[in-house]
Image (tube, helix red, strand yellow):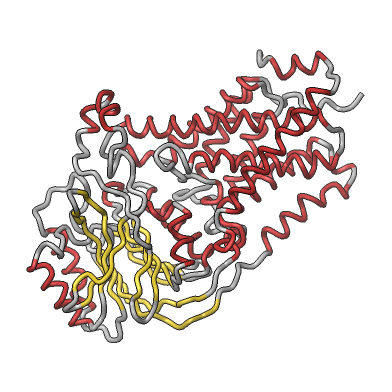
Amino acid sequence: MPEKSHRRLLPLWGGVLAAAAGGFAYDLGFPGASIWPLAFAGVALALISLIGRSSWGAALVGLVFGLSFYLLQVSWTSLYLGPVPWLALSTLESLFVAGGGVLIALAYRWLTRSSDSQLVRLIALPLIVAGLWCVREFATGSIPYGGFPWGRAALSQSESPFAQVVSWAGSTGLSFVMVALVAGVIEWVRLSGWRRPFTVLPVTGLLVVAMLVPAWQTAPAGELRVASVQGNGPTGYFDEREPGDVLAAQLAATEPILDESGIDVLLWPEGGSDIDPTRSEAVARTFDRLSEQLDAPLVLNTVTTRDDEFFNTSMLWRAGEGAVDTYDKRHPVPFGEYIPDRDFWYSLAPDLIGLVQREYTPGTNAPVFDLGDAVTGLAICFDVIYDDVIWEAAHDGAQLYMFQTNNADFRGTDENLQQLAIARLRAIETGRSVVNISTVGTSQVIDPAGRTIDALPSDVRGAMVTDVELRDGLTPAVVLGPSVPFIVVIGSLAALISPGIIARRRSRDPRDDAAVETDAG
């Protein structure tokens, strides 16, 4: 009789405990603990808890894994607004994890029932499980209201030997490789692969390629001297301030570098000016003088109003010309920068929803500025987690990236470090330097290899003047763009359905059904 490989490895209570431990370990793989190997351990515990599980059992352990992870990963959302947003976001994302857990449990059940081939177990099954993990990541990054791609497996690997994979296949590709490696090792152990040494070749081959593949090399195109300023002003949502206080803090932090020679552009963070210079002649004159003194354009950010709509706007400012180009934040944060379906959510939580009075409209303009000496790509705060903004800028000729953010509402949490890890992966993914400037820190300049070459610590006023390398050319990750998640999602779902049909047609041992259809004990 063939091995009943679809039977569960753990009783339900053991699966719940493994899932909870897995979510905890998975979180430790991300900044700030940044123990990247633990992300693999977390994935392993998640998969072990799902093998042989019924659909309802898989949903339960998936939910536990998701809650254990997200309650830690996004705990910074509770800093000022209390537990409700934190619990709501964590629960929503965990429901997606539960749904993904059901799909993975079905893959383990159907593939092992449809075929007794070791090749299916060692190659096809790990690849399908990895693809279904990415299906769940795609769903959380897309819905509802544009999704929340925070916490993708790849984002734990910004400082690991696997980071270079993103230049070839993006974050989806790296997540796929990570889960495929873990699932491959699990199947090798379950098959007692040490008795047949050649069976280790599939997972070993993937491991060697993933660790040794070099990042795609884009072409050097000179340098740009970038001055970036962290004002450490009162930019938090609940900070006490008067109009102009944030602007004054940024100007004070800029003052020490005004005598620096050869500056090509001055970069300020998101919300660096709390007064719109297109509506204030005095502030416009201030920026004109600053641009004249540096003999360089400024990249600023402020709130703008057009046709009774508010925008989170970055602008390219030149002395005597004003704002010669603008970029409006493409992905305003739902429930932070706007309230979708306001009437419905207000009826549930009027006090919290009432805090968000000003609603930002999503931008449609291109995320690039032509600085004259170079073209820069742009992303404003959480824009950086959305692939479309980054890929579009590269296709539009960006030779470096400038990421503007305001982390003041998350002081003392891991949020800024998590966002910096994403910025680091974007540098590797696109083969471009990244200048990531925050109002309150931590701010960094990152080279195309993902190395930090300049930095300002959090909660200090300061400025950096950095010679930043420019690059031309597109990496495979950018060229392939949305094709990678599309192929992974469609391919893995199709690969799940086919064995499911075969498995239902094959004769089954009733005792095996009982093992997966009940999760008692």
Could you say where residue 198 lies in the image, as x and y percent from the top left? 88, 50
Could you say where residue 120 lies in the image, as x and y percent from the top left? 81, 40
Which residue: 22% across, 50% down?
310
Compared with 101, 222 (above or below) is below
Could you say where residue 258 lies in the image, as x and y percent from the top left? 21, 80
Which residue: 79% across, 31% down?
112
Left or right of 266, for residue 499 = right
Compared with 269, 521 (above or below) is above
Say which quarter of the image contains residue 131.
Answer: top right
Pick the front one: 412 or 129: 129
Which residue: 13% across, 64% down?
248
Say which quarter of the image contains residue 126.
Answer: top right
For this orientation, the residue located farthest to the bottom is 261
Left or right of 445, for residue 219 = right
For this orientation, the residue located farthest to the front is 307
> Could you tell me if residue 279 is visible in this image?
yes
For this orientation, the residue located farthest to the right is 1
Compared with 499, 444 (above or below) is below
Could you say where residue 257 lies in the image, as x and y percent from the top left? 23, 78
Q: Quadrant of the N terminus?
A: top right
Q: Quadrant of the C terminus?
A: top right
Which residue: 50% across, 51% down?
34
Say which quarter of the image contains residue 324.
Answer: bottom left
> Could you tell me if residue 229 is visible in this image?
no
Pick the front one: 240 or 97: 97
Pick the front one: 226 or 45: 226
